[in-house]
Image (spheres, helix red, strand yellow):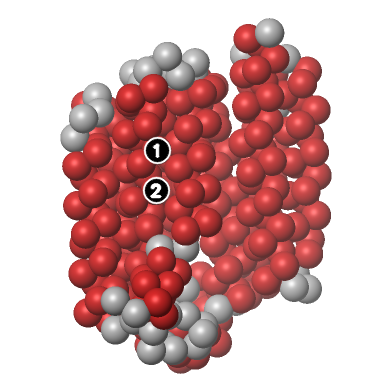
Amino acid sequence: MTGERARGLLELTRPINAVAAGALTFIGAFVVGGLDRPAMVAAAVGATVLAVGAGNTMNDYFDREIDRINQPDRAIPRGAVTPREALVSSLALFAGAVALALVLPLLALAIAVVNLLALVAYTEVFKGLPGVGNAVVGYLGGSTFLFGAAAVGRVTAAVVVLFALAALSTVAREIVKDVEDVAGDREEGLNTLPIAVGERTALWLAVGLLAVALVASPLPYVQETFGWPYLVVVALADLAMGYAAVESFTDPTAGQEHLSYAMFLAAAAFVVGRVAVAL
């Protein structure tokens, strides 16, 4: 295998995104105090990284014609990797994720199965349906936290709130990304939300979802699950999300990127809250 092909295969997995998803699974386990089961945590994190890498590779396989317009520098459009090589790589990564998930408790295994099916079906079934593809990605993003908690057998109210906040924020970010990709999606005949209802209406829907997430974000403090350190950090995340939402109306690319950073800051708030409780 040539160096360019190896780099292309790695690039298809979006390694930073895959590792970040694994970190979110770790946070899910950490928030519920599950680090006393390191083997389960490691298996869950590994399964998440492999599954996300597989899903990203599969997405590029199906999106290769759209990417010739929207993302011509990606591995398949520029010729670093053939479509067949991408498909084989994706299936191998999925197999690895399944192997790791099989050692986990039943609820975690069920989440893994649902997520793997959603990842496989996303591009061909859900992506072109207005809002549905966004909702699927939102669920997948939020479920990384649930998966980590389920892997150690401790799904608590705090991690359910974290799942809901992450899911809502992710749906909003995906809507903004669809606004960014309108030209290529329209060329391919996809009926994404901005195409179906208009870009500005779609952005206002994203703002509405973010507003729900921001209003709900103090719940772990109100429920006395976490104390004031959590509230301080999540307030900063809320401000960052609000700024990104406004920015999306003039620069969708920057808006969705800054939403991603704000979402990780919100996840960090739960880590801070858990650490503060343990001290």
Image quarter where the C terminus lies is: top right
The quadrant holding residue 226 is top right
Residue 76, x across and y down, in percent: 38, 83
Q: Is residue 229 left or right of residue 19?
A: right
- Quick check: 76 above or below 41? below
> What residue sits right under mark 2 in the picture?
49
Q: Between residues 29 and 139, which one lies in front from this camera angle?
A: 29
Give me the residue at 68% from left, 30% from top: 269
Number of numbered markers: 2
- Quick check: 255 above or below 228? below
Q: CA distance from mark 1 to mark 2?
A: 6 Å
Q: Are marks 1 and 2 in contact (CB under 8 Å)?
A: yes
Give me the residue at 38% from left, 89% from top: 79
Give me the residue at 80% from left, 44% from top: 239
> What residue sits right under mark 1 in the picture?
45
Disc 1 marks which amino acid? Val
In this orientation, does residue 270 appear? yes
Q: Few, some or many C-alpha atoms within 10 Å of disc 2 (few <14, some 14-19, many ≥20)?
A: many
Q: Between residues 18 and 163, which one lies in front from this camera angle?
A: 18
Disc 2 marks which amino acid? Val
Q: Is residue 116 left or right of residue 73?
A: left
